[in-house]
Image (cartoon, rainbow, N blue to C red):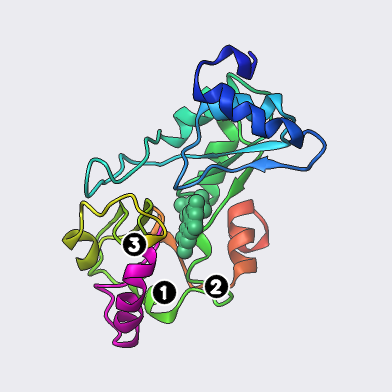
């Protein structure tokens, strides 16, 4: 199937991608732009090397119906994308354990991208307040919000997110408007009013060194 077989914006998408054939490009639509089979077809046609399939594990918690782009469960996404391309697929979204890695490899991925699994490790650049919140049982889940920056991102549900469920899609204006508030809250140690970005698997994030986490995920020495 060719990108040109798709109507409307998918054809528009193929045009700017067409110059990339000789470049080592991995297409990685993330929080602000969901993975779609249309995008992978356009990227394949343009010569991309691989595609990052970023999906979710459990139904997304939305603080407002308009606050998130459409997204599909990771395994469904891998299946749909594999059906329209031979590109190597990199799976992302709540991959926290060796079993999670095994599951997505079995579903057709050749590699994984992990973010949250490394958030608490000593080498992570996350602020101490953020790292502590990830382990704080007072936080009971994540949700997708636009409250901090004006574009959708997933974080631990806190007071600021609950107070602003209908934040507009206005990046970077919202980001700049909230920045001083977030800085003041961080200085005061107030985790109710700072962005605490986190993936769905945050409860499994540990303080282990990054090398050990890689070994655990890949089935290396530390996993035994
Ligand atoms: C602290 C943090 C910051 C992130 N920032 C971005 C971002 O700016 N843009 C984006 O598309 N995704 C962002 N993400 C999503 C990561 O790319 C995502 O974590 C990755 O797909 C793996 O999912 P996982 O965190 O569930 O392992 C961020 C994630 C975290 C934990």
Please name the residue shown 59% across and 58% down the image.
216
Q: Is mark 3 within 8 Å of ligand 1?
A: no
Q: Is residue 116 magenta?
A: no
Q: Is residue 113 above or below residue 11?
A: below
Q: CA distance from mark 3 to mark 1?
A: 24 Å
Residue 131's label in the rendered image is 1
Q: Nearer the viewer, residue 83 or 150?
A: 150
Please name the residue shown 26% across and 46% down the image.
61
**In the rendered structure, which disc, 1 or 2, sits on the residue that comes first in sequence?**
2
Q: Is residue 122 above or below residue 154?
A: below
Residue 116: in sight, yes or no? no
Disc 3 is placed on an element classified as helix
Crowd rating for badge 2 (residues with CA inside 10 Å; few <14, some 14–19, many 20+): some
Disc 1 is placed on an element classified as helix
Residue on which the image places disc 3: 174
Please name the residue shown 26% across and 72% down the image.
193
Instruction: Please provide percent x and percent y for residue 218.
Output: 64, 52
In the figure, is residue 160 to the left or right of 195?
left
Whether tag 1 and tag 2 are in contact, CB under 8 A, the answer is yes
Q: Which residues are magenta?
A: 174-198
Instruction: Please provide percent x and percent y for residue 21.
Output: 78, 33
Instruction: Please provide percent x and percent y for residue 33.
Output: 47, 41
Residue 124's label in the rendered image is 2
């Amino acid at each position: 199937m060719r990108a040109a077989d798709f109507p409307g914006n998918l054809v528009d998408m193929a045009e700017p991608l067409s110059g990339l054939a000789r470049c080592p490009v991995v297409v990685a639509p993330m929080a602000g732009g969901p993975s779609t089979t249309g995008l992978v077809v356009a990227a394949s046609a343009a010569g991309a090397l691989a595609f990052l399939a970023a999906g979710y594990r459990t139904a997304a918690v939305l603080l407002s119906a308009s606050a998130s782009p459409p997204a599909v469960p990771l395994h469904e996404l891998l299946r749909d994308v594999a059906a329209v391309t031979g590109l190597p697929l990199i799976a992302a979204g709540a991959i926290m354990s060796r079993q999670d890695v095994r599951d997505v490899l079995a579903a057709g991925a050749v590699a994984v991208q992990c973010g949250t699994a490394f958030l608490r490790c000593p080498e992570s650049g996350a602020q101490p307040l953020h790292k502590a919140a990830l382990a704080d049982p007072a936080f009971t889940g994540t949700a997708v919000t636009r409250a901090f920056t004006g574009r959708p991102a997933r974080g631990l549900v806190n007071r600021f997110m609950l107070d602003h469920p209908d934040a507009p899609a206005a990046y970077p204006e919202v980001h700049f408007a909230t920045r001083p508030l977030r800085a003041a809250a961080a200085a005061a140690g107030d985790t109710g009013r700072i962005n605490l970005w986190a993936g769905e698997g945050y409860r499994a994030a540990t303080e282990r060194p990054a090398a050990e986490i890689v070994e655990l995920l890949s089935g290396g020495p530390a996993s035994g």
